Image (cartoon, rainbow, N blue to C red):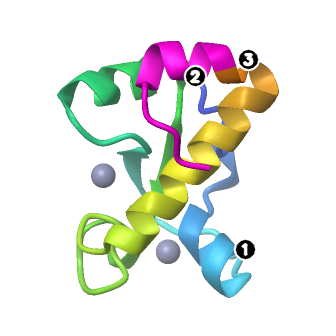
Amino acid sequence: MAKSIMHNKQDRTCYLCMLLNGDYDTRTGLQEHHAMPGTANRKLSEHYSLKVYLCLEHHTVGPYAVHNNARLRRMLQEKAQTVFEERYSHEEWTRAFVSNYI
Ligand SMILES: [Zn+2]
Ligand SMILES: [Zn+2]
């Protein structure tokens, strides 16, 4: 499986614990999340490795879970586009994902 260009799995940190709470502690039971939702975009997220690792509370359980929180979902999309464009280009982003999140 391709290594994420957003977040290093080996760090065993939760991406949103770091981003929102400045919490860099290692976790167990982290789950992989594709930054771009939707069937087609999920495949592209996998292809370009736009993935992060999240604790349960930031993935699927409760109000601060990215699957329940549109604001956080949007934040991850913005991060994904930023990282992607640093590595590739804005043109390539538009070709692949069409919409602009920044
Ligand atoms: Zn977390
Ligand atoms: Zn997910």
Name the residue located 43 percent from the left edge and 25 percent from the top edge.
Answer: 97
Task: Kindly identify the amino acid type of the residue bearing the numbered disc 2.
Answer: Trp
Task: Give the CA distance from mark 1 to mark 3.
Answer: 28 Å
* 21 to the left or right of 87: left
Decide: few, some or many residues near mark 3? Use Cα within 10 Å; few <14, some 14-19, many ≥20.
Answer: few
Decide: few, some or many residues near mark 1? Use Cα within 10 Å; few <14, some 14-19, many ≥20.
Answer: some
Magenta part of the chain = 91-102
Res 84 → quadrant? top right
Task: Kindly identify the amino acid type of the residue bearing the numbered disc 1.
Answer: Tyr
Q: Name the residue under label 3.
A: 88
Name the residue located 25 percent from the left edge and 22 percent from the top edge.
Answer: 40
State the residue lying farthest toward the left.
Answer: 39
* 87 to the left or right of 35: right
Cβ of mark 1 under 8 Å from ligand 1: the answer is no
Q: Can residue 62 be seen in this view?
A: yes
For numbered disc 1, what is the local secondary structure?
loop
Q: Mark 2 points at which residue?
A: 93
Please say if 51 is above or below 45: below
Badge 2 or badge 3: first in the primary sequence: 3
Viewer-closest of 28 and 65? 65
Residue 30 drawn at (x, y percent): 43, 59
Name the residue located 73 percent from the left edge and 82 percent from the top edge.
Answer: 22
Q: Name the residue under label 1.
A: 24
